[in-house]
Amino acid sequence: MRYRAARALILAAALLSSASVATGPAAGQVQENQRFSIPAGPLNKALIAFGRQSGLQVTYLGAVAAGKSSNGFTGAATRQEALTSLLAGTGLVYTFPNAKTVAISPSAPAGVDASVVGATVLKKIIIDGEDNGVVATDSSIATKSDTPIVEIPQTVNVVTRKEMDDRAVTDFNSAVAYTPGIRAIDYPGGQGMPDIYLRGFRANSQIANYRDGLRNGFNAYDGDIEMYGLERLDILKGPGSALFGQTAPGGLVNATTKRPTEDTLRQIDLEYGSNDRKQLGLDFSGPIDEQGAILYRMTGLYRESDTQIDHSPENALYIAPALTFAPDDATSLTILANYHKVEKGGAEQSLPMDNTIFDNGIRIPSSLYLGIPGVTEWNAKTASLGYEFSHEFDNGWTAKQSLRYTHADIDYTSGWIWDWPTALYDGHYARIGAQQRPKTTDAVVLDTNIGGDVDIGPTEHKLLFGIDYGYYNGSESRTNSTNYITVDVLDPSYDSSGLTFGSPWADETIIQHQLGVYAQDQIKVENWVLSLAGRYDWVEGEVEDHLGGSETSTDDRAFTGRVGLGYLLDNGVAPYVSYSTSFQPETGTDFNGEPFEPTTGAQWEAGVKYQPTAWNGFLSASVFQITQQNVTTADPVNIGYSIQEGEVRSRGFELEGKAELTDALSLLAGYSYTDARVTKDNDNASGVSKVGSRLSSVPYHQANLWLNYTFGESVLTGLTLGGGVRYVGSSMAPMDTTTGEQVKVSGYALLDASVSYDFGMAKPDLKGLKLTLSGTNLTDEKYFTPGFYSDTVFYGNRRTVKAALSHKW
């Protein structure tokens, strides 16, 4: 395995060099006549309809089409003829930077090649990551290349920067709170990455967390997500192994980092809110040289904040410089770096049900800290450095390479109630112990691919070939306290003077290498779209036990794939069906000492997507069934050991709609039904089987609705009102494996709102100044989510309000 990184780089170089012999259609080649039916109206709506009916990706800056109208076009014509008619009288022109993309731009000044203007518009959109308000119509999460979402044969949800700002998002949980089919467990005062469930499947060890198309990390406690530094979130539902390798069956989430912009950006954000939250954010970007070939961005944040949990801060320092070098329209190199320091409390905060959801004694306050101040804490320092390189060859094929190195130092001492799963000791006392678990990790992830278009007879092929490599090295020790402290939950006083720690009971280094090769073909035949993708992975792991002086290793290999078929109707409706698979390495060994094989997942999905031609919106509906096999269950022969005979199944359906109903009113709506349960299991030593039981923390029902309205020219000019409600149905706590009991935790509905005022709309002298007041759980609903263990829960997030003042110039 020591040579695998070198092999990956050699293969990557081979892929890049192969681009020189790739072939594809010339940009802007003449097309045959086709039917168009585009009504007269706002130009942006006409261009959306044209893109849908022509099969082209239409790119332009929002300001270019703002306020312009089109006479529309109906009849048979080439793409060029239809475009000429649509743009008549607008003062805009079109160019074809490549065979599948048309760029709309102002007419070029005298002596300037119009193709240069169009290519500049395209480059600006790519670098800026501009999206269409709260509605996103393209994504690369499923295909590793920009693809219209309507052509992707799986469910894709996108949370744009505009949506985050409308809802005044502060963390990952609030960012995805209005997305169906994903549940992030509310865990105030908790440590590490968000605990997320996608279509019923929990995603541990960051196996579902990606950043800029690369896996974010390999351990849940290696870092956190800072939403201020992101442009958008793309969420793929169902297996994504066909292109990404080892993933959870329920899907994955990709976060896109803020990139340098061609236009000068200067923004300062000040926040103050509940729990004495104080935050300063800085975001500066623009060109460095006169030609605009070198761009920079510097994003920074400093936060000091308490939380609803005593002695549990949420302090952060985030610095993310970025630099883009684009010497011409075909080549771009972006360097991305960040440093993230986070300080949080170290208490696990698993609370006994008897003293929370049941009235079996004293109710534990939502502020109680189940740690030891000055002892238990989670302090993480994470730094990363990487780059993204892209080059388009003369034949239209594009080679891309992304790399990131990450180092993390984790100072973590956790605290928990000593005598689980009993209720409070002597009525209202909690015995709290501690565990020291410092950790240091290093990770390298690399992805290289080349893609282009080829026409074979009546079929159009969008091909992609790639290879990626991942390396992880993490060292951690664990040492328990030999005793505990006793705390009165109604009048907590923490005396740690007598607390002592023993010798480490674990001290190990985990090393993992992953290498994967993949290929994809997106085939178009008239209105049909056939998507084929396949991948083969090699995953090798080593665990070095420094206490026992032993070493164990695993060697897993897996082929995964996806096949999907869709039909693109001229009115924007696109039904589809797909089948996709996944694999996920499993830790542990059986009775014979043999390492467990990876679990495997398979999903059937059918649905319909609708991208309207007359208004800006996107609607989707899907039904699915995911089956995960090779799940560990009790060994019926060798008591106390496990074998891989278990199975889990999740089935349900999802609905989502996002729309700019008018220039002033936008809407977000979603609903999901998920039935996730164990379908195969063996009896354990207590004679308990999990067959038929629901997976913990997964509600049957989730629903949300958000409306945002901006007042036009009136006495209320500059005022924007937003409000929403999100409902999460009841879910089950983990099963008690000795009794077979599974407790239901009640659902809840939460009310959120945001009010903002843009001073510059009424007074031009104050352009760029904006004040926002926002709140979540405004009725202060007391709710709980299932804990990590049976008979435990977490308190939900109580009401929070904040004020934010931003200045952008």
Image (tube, rainbow, N blue to C red):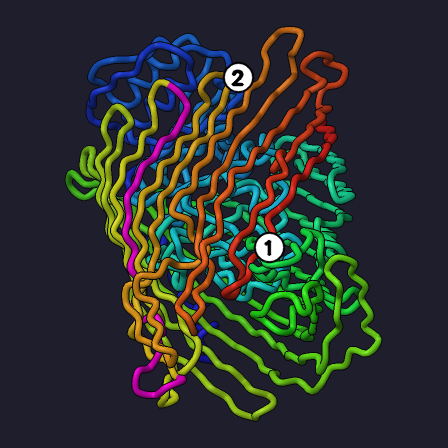
Numbered range of the magenta stretch: 615-640
Q: Does any portion of residue 229 appear in the rendered image?
A: no
Picture residue at 42% right of the left edge, 53% below the top: 698
User: How many numbered marks are there?
Assistant: 2
Question: Which of 26 and 211 lies nearest the eye of the viewer?
Answer: 211
State the image coordinates of residue 53 (x, y, percent, origin top left).
Answer: 28, 26
Would residue 799 appear left or right of 516 to someone viewing this image? right
Q: Secondary structure at mark 1?
A: loop
The residue that disc 1 covers is 356
Query: Looking at the rendered structure, which numbered label has been put on residue 787?
Result: none
The residue that disc 2 covers is 664
Q: Quadrant of residue 337?
A: bottom right
State the image coordinates of residue 607 (x, y, percent, origin top left).
Answer: 27, 39
The amino acid type of the residue labelled 2 equals Ala
* Label 2 Cα neighbours within 10 Å, binned few <14 / some 14-19 / many ≥20: few
> Is residue 714 in the magenta section?
no
Q: Is residue 53 above or below residue 418?
A: above
